[in-house]
Amino acid sequence: AAGDVAKIMRFVTIRDKELRAKLTPDYDFGCKRPTFSNSYYRPFTKQHVHLQDSGIARIESDGIVANDGTKTAIDTLVLATGFDL
């Protein structure tokens, strides 16, 4: 049931099929830490937000270069592993 709710939330919030597919987990709900936020997906639908899903090739002083060669200029880079170090 919780997986169905998550699926509905993605469908309602993310109208773009391609973006929704990229943000849909390839595992069942609860197999990893679930996101219970009802505002998690909303930022991805904004014009100034881009989901970088091709991986990071390198980090430069003024931006990030993705594996597909695109460079995104950044002011701040926040790294978060999710692990208690």
Image (spheres, helix red, strand yellow):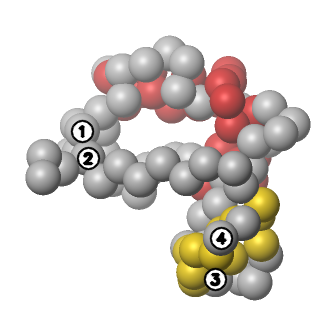
Residue 82 - label: 2
Residue 61 - label: 4
What separation in Å lies between label 3 and label 1 (alpha carbons)?
Answer: 27 Å
Q: Residue at x 70, y 66 (%)?
A: 63
The image shows residue 66 at horizontal and vertical percentages of 66, 76
Q: Nearer the viewer, mark 1 or mark 2?
A: 2
* Label 4 vs 3, first from the N-terminus: 4
Discs 2, 4 touching: Cβ within 8 Å = no
Going by the numbered disc 2, the residue's amino acid type is Gly
Q: 10 Å neighbourhood of mark 4: few (<14), some, or many (≥20)?
A: few
Q: Look at the numbered disc 4 and give the secondary structure of its residue.
A: loop
Q: Which residue is mark 3?
A: 67
In which quarter of the view is residue 6 placed?
top left
Q: 10 Å neighbourhood of mark 3: few (<14), some, or many (≥20)?
A: some
Identity of the residue furthest to the left in this view? 85
Q: Look at the numbered disc 3 and give the secondary structure of its residue.
A: loop
Discs 3, 1 touching: Cβ within 8 Å = no
Q: Which residue is mark 1?
A: 33
* Label 2 vs 3, first from the N-terminus: 3
The correct choice, above or below, for 12 with respect to 19 in the image is: above
Discs 1, 2 touching: Cβ within 8 Å = yes
